[in-house]
Amino acid sequence: MPHILPTHQGRASERILFELIGGPGKTIPSNNHFDTTRGNIEHSGAEAVDLVIDEGTNPKSRHPFKGNLDPGKLEQLIASVGAGRIPVCMLTVTNNSGGGQPVSLANIHEVSSICHRHGIPLFLDACRFAENAFLIKTREPGQRHRRVRDIAREMFDLADGATISAKKDGLVNIGGVLLMRDDTLAKRADSLLILTEGFITYGGLAGRDLEAMAQGFTEVLDEDYLRYRLRSVEYLGERLLEAGIQIVEPPGGHAIYIDAAAFCPQIPPGQFPGQALVCALYTHAGIRSVEIGSVMFGRVDPDTGESSKPPLELVRLAIPRRVYTQSHIDYVVEAVCEVFKYREQLRGFRITEAPATLRHFTAKFEHL
Ligand SMILES: Cc1ncc(COP(=O)(O)O)c(C=O)c1O
């Protein structure tokens, strides 16, 4: 990409991008927007729309690329709102809020071609580009002989830009980038970056963080590293499935997602089954997970006070890179299985305090 702007993390890239091209009256599709992406789009006044394929919302489906964006739904959206109101189409690789599921190279080609036929730029939310490229290599027909680096290159070649949180496949503690091809947009982004991030050479990061990020983006493409990492995730998923615990199948890139609705069916979505499981895992075994369901994506109706219900109630067990050994993973398996034994005793929660946007970061809860 001709323009590479460093930022302090992914959401800073998103804020700059959507302040430039978002705004009231605009619609921004994706397979699934991640929470901060959706938050930044909505903060600009635009509407964020999720167009993942139907298999992507069925935890039991073993479709190899459940992160794919549905081309038919994209065409329909363009026909209904008009291309002029769609300033960008995003594609999250891998699809974090949809179970860490990969997007196929064929799908990136198809979405890119639809977007470009209608004059809509395609941006990747590319935090996990290397894991997505590795899953393309192992799952997509005709890709096994290729280097992950070459597949990743092809993914970026199909896009007009990208937002990246380098805390994932950049293998660093802090950092992000905003990539783009459009010279005029990049000049406007430079000005916004200077306003809040720092100068365009460092984007709010220290020199050592920038060097670590450059090194991380190189090392992450090491295929032995990727094989080990994705196998650890898969191992965790297999053990949970063997114990009868429903996860989003097949295991995806960076995490295992437990189907919290199936884990505690006695807790209705309005009482946050995922949050109940998150709290139980922490109090039982000190395991920190995150709810990706009605707390994160439920929208509160201002008239009724009722929260809407997203398609999935998930609990994400995200696995930090280069931290855990197999015995740590075995500990997690044992702990989740122990909580599973007393799942019928888990109770729901009520929110006692929450901000209007991105409520899951700071909301307070009370046990029911
Ligand atoms: C897909 C995706 N996009 C964006 C972000 C935001 O990145 P950051 O936490 O660096 O602001 C994340 C972080 O988890 C993510 O997973």
Image: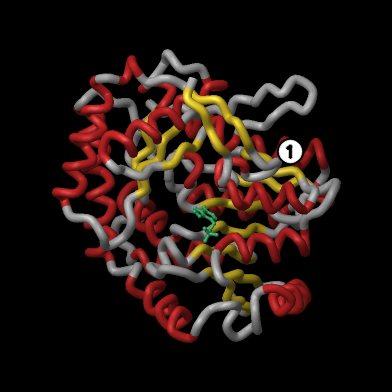
Q: Is residue 18 above or below residue 348?
A: below
Q: Residue 37 appears at what percent x and percent y?
A: 62, 52
Res 200 seen here:
yes
Q: Residue at x 18, y 55 (%)?
A: 325
Q: Residue at x 52, y 22 (%)?
A: 271
To which residue does mark 1 refer?
77
Label 1 near ligand 1 (CB < 8 Å)? no
If the image is split into quadrants, where does the N terminus sit? bottom right
Q: Residue 283 appears at what percent x and percent y?
A: 32, 36
Q: Residue at x 65, y 47 (%)?
A: 38
**Splitting the image into 4 quarters, where does residue 311 fall?**
top right
Q: Residue 289 appears at what percent x and percent y?
A: 38, 42
Q: Secondary structure at mark 1?
A: helix
Q: How is the image coloured?
A: secondary structure
Along the viewing direction, whichever of 207 and 286 lies nearer the viewer: 286
Res 183 seen here:
no
Q: Residue 80 appears at what percent x and percent y?
A: 80, 36
Task: Classify mark 1: residues with Cα within 10 Å, few (<14), some (14-19) or many (20+).
Answer: some
Q: Is residue 168 above or below residue 108?
A: below
Q: How many labels were placed on the picture?
A: 1
